[in-house]
Amino acid sequence: MAVTARARWWSWRMGRSLGRNIGFEMNTVARLLVASVAGPQYTVGMKWIVQNPDILGGQPRVNGTRLSVSFVIQCISEGMTASEIAQDYPGFPPEALPEILQYAADRLSQPDPKLAA
């Protein structure tokens, strides 16, 4: 896990000090490092949303990042656009936003088993 944190910090630092292009390339390297040490990914039937019990306590998150689906939804509720999220959180793919919203809608449309009884 220390390699993951170090890779993410290096990616962020390089992106801030040398410009966006280098930051994007370093972020890609960080994603590869994260994938190699994070263990198995459990998809939830979607391209951009995965779960891993070792990352964020198993919360659904955006693939290749440590941004949970709930965090992205919170950003949207505060009025941020996909491009603003991507600017503030390098590595967030703006093209993942429709899938995140669909995932949230699907989860909300399912009945709560605690209330069904």
Image (cartoon, helix red, strand yellow):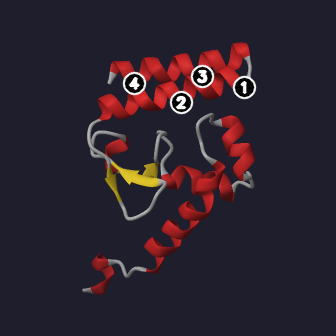
Tell me which label, 1 or 3, sits earlier in the chain: 3
Tell me which label, 2 or 3, sits earlier in the chain: 3
Residue 36 visible to an observer of this rendering: yes
Residue 28's disc is 2
Instruction: Assess whether mark 4 and mark 1 are in contact (beta carbons under 8 angstroms).
Output: no
Q: CA distance from mark 1 to mark 4?
A: 21 Å
Residue type at mark 2 is Thr
Query: Could you classify mark 4 by the number of other residues whose Cα lies within 10 Å: few (under 14), some (14-19), or many (20 or more)?
Result: some
* Rendered residue at 30%/29% (across/down): 37
Displayed quadrant of residue 1: top left
Tell me which label, 1 or 4, sits earlier in the chain: 4
Residue type at mark 4 is Thr
The residue identified by callout 4 is 4
The residue identified by callout 3 is 12
* Rendered residue at 53%/16% (across/down): 10
Query: Could you classify mark 3 by the number of other residues whose Cα lies within 10 Å: few (under 14), some (14-19), or many (20 or more)?
Result: many
Of 111 and 81, the residue lying toward us = 81
Q: CA distance from mark 2 to mark 3?
A: 11 Å
Residue 69's disc is none
Q: Is residue 72 above or below residue 90?
A: below
Q: Is residue 100 above or below residue 66?
A: below
